[in-house]
Image (cartoon, rainbow, N blue to C red):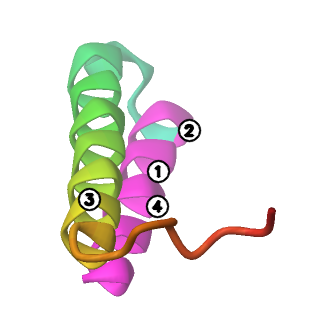
Amino acid sequence: MEFLNLLIILVAGWLLWRRPDKERLAFGLLVASCLLMALLFLIGTHTSFVPGVNL
C-alpha cells in the first residue's frame, strides 16, 4: 500500500512537470494520497493505546 502512495505522488509530480495544464488532476491525486496515508495510519494504530510514534 505504501508503494501505491509513492506511485501516486510520483504520477502527480510527473503530471506537474510534463503536463502543467493537468494541475487540478495532480492536486487531486496528491489529496487522495494524503487521505490514503491517514487511513493507513488509522487502520494500523486503531488497537494501540499510543500510536507507534516517537514520544
Looking at the image, is mark 4 or mark 3 earlier in the sequence?
4
Image height check: is 15 above or below 7? above
Seen as rendered, the residue at the extreme right is 55
Amino acid type, callout 3: Leu
The Cα atoms of the two marked residues, 2 and 4, are separated by 11 Å
Amino acid type, callout 2: Trp
Disc 3 target residue: 42
Looking at the image, is mark 3 or mark 1 earlier in the sequence?
1
The Cα atoms of the two marked residues, 4 and 1, are separated by 6 Å
Tags 1 and 2 touching, CB below 8 Å:
yes
**Which element is circle 2 on?**
helix
- The quadrant of the image that shows the C terminus is bottom right
**Which element is circle 3 on?**
helix
Disc 2 target residue: 17
**Which element is circle 4 on?**
helix
Magenta span contains residue 55: no
- The quadrant of the image that shows the N terminus is bottom left
Main SS, magenta region, reads helix
Spot occupied by residue 54 in the image (x, y as percentages of width and height): 78, 69
Image height check: is 21 above or below 46? above
Would residue 28 be found to the left or right of residue 2 on screen? left
Q: Nearer the viewer, mark 4 or mark 1?
A: 4
The crowding category of the residue bearing disc 4, from other C-alpha atoms within 10 Å (few below 14, some 14 to 19, many at least 20), is some
